[in-house]
Amino acid sequence: MTNGNENGETRFSWFIPIDGDGARAGTLRAERPPDFDYLRQVVQTAEDLGFYSLLIPTRFANGLFAEDAPLAETWTTATALAAVTERIRFLIAVRPGFIALGLFAQMAAALHQISKGRIDINIVPGGIQNDFERVGEVSDHSTRYERAEEFIAACRKLWTEPGPVEFQGDHYKLKDAYCSPMPEGQPPRFYLGGASPSANALSGRQADVHLNWIEPLADSKARFDAVREEFKKAGRSPELGIRTHLVVRDREDDAWKAANELIDHADPAVKAQRRAAIVGTPMVGQQAQAQQAPNHIVAPHLWNGLSEVRVNCGTAIVGTPEQVTDVLLDYWKLGVDEFILSGFPHVEECQRVATDVLPLLRQKMAAG
């Protein structure tokens, strides 16, 4: 089976825990704070084990522990980590509107050069409820998507056309602008996530890769079918990615025990903070991640207990290596080109997934 990317190879990526890490989530403070030495250990583990890329999210407050807990700033951290690695890529989440467009294009081009072409950009038009307001940003859902589209188009122009560059949009305007040196080879690719009609339409027109958080298989299929339709309208071919946590143990009972222990020690104040970020949110994906289900089991081996304590992706695949592999295989058969995986703690679980899951999954994929 060949999916939508050029070489037909499925990519497996990992995650940089900028909120902190440990075997317990939702406590007031992380067992492992997100200092540079620890995040470097996560990143180098993933690089040593052959993962394709690392997603580094963007936040204005901690999204896994108490809101005032230490948080590693996205761009600074990614830049530092790129400088101490050699092969692995970085998928850097960026919110349009918070850095001047021309400056961002220059920053991204510089990091592209420093990293020898190892960065991609995850555009985040939506947001965690009340998060933008912390830093003085007030804008509605549709405005953020319109702004994101111009942001991508203008960056592509700056990265591919010799200056001076002109761009006239409603949100961004460039006059006699330059980005020098321009990125050599392939410029950073744009990943776009989301589940709303606006997100799908924007991906259809602008995304190099469309990302969704994991949901029950039928729901994920419907999401992908909808975004494929938008790509078709735009005369483009989609590449699809899925983001999920994994809880893997040799015995199924131990896997479920480990999943529940992740949130068993969560602080009530942290749970309240996460509920406040979801209630009334216009973000379709966040609503889906937090759906109510007995014991948080939304489908066989699919558990959304992390949504109690974590903003954004709150669902994990839980089971033995064989069970987890079979679930991932089902999503691959939907046409997924890239899996962005994570597990707590991120060093040990990166090793476990690379040893116990991915070889078996690749074997099953090769068998069709």
Image (cartoon, grey):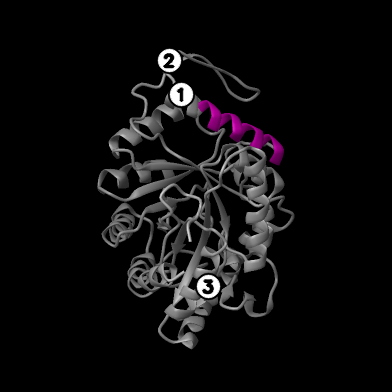
Q: Amino acid at mark 1?
A: Leu
Say which element carries label 3. helix
User: Which callout, 3 or 2, points to the residue nearer the camera?
Assistant: 3
Question: Looking at the image, which residue is at 55% across and 41% down?
Answer: 207
Q: Is residue 148 magenta?
A: yes
Mark 1 and 2 residues: CB-CB less than 8 Å, in contact? yes
Q: Is residue 311 above or below residue 189?
A: below
Residue 254 at x, y percent in the picture: 46, 85
Is there any visible trace of residue 329 in the rendered image?
Answer: yes
Q: Quadrant location of residue 171?
A: top right
**Which badge, 3 or 2, is on the more N-terminal residue?**
2
Where is mark 1, residue-wise? Answer: 158
247 vs 301, nearest the viewer: 301
Residue pointed to by mark 2: 163
**49 and 346: which one is in front?**
49
Distance of label 1 from label 2 (alpha carbons): 7 Å
Q: Is residue 200 magenta?
A: no
Say which amino acid is labelled 2. Answer: Gly
Q: Which residues are magenta?
A: 140-154
Residue 13 in which image quadrant: bottom left
The residue at 36%/66% (across/down) is 350
- Crowding at label 1, few (<14), some or many (≥20) Cα neighbours within 10 Å? many
What residue appears at the point 68 percent right and 34 percent down from the top-left corner? 143
Query: Looking at the picture, how far across and down is residue 281, in whole percent?
Result: 71, 52
* First along the sequence among labels 1 and 2: 1
Quickly name the residue at label 3: 327
Q: Main secondary structure of the magenta part?
A: helix
Where disc 2 sits, the SS reads loop
Q: CA distance from mark 3 to mark 2?
A: 48 Å
Q: Does dot 1 land on a helix, a strand or a loop?
A: helix
Looking at marks 3 and 1 on the same chain, the residue that comes earlier in the sequence is marked by 1
Q: Which mark is residue 31?
A: none
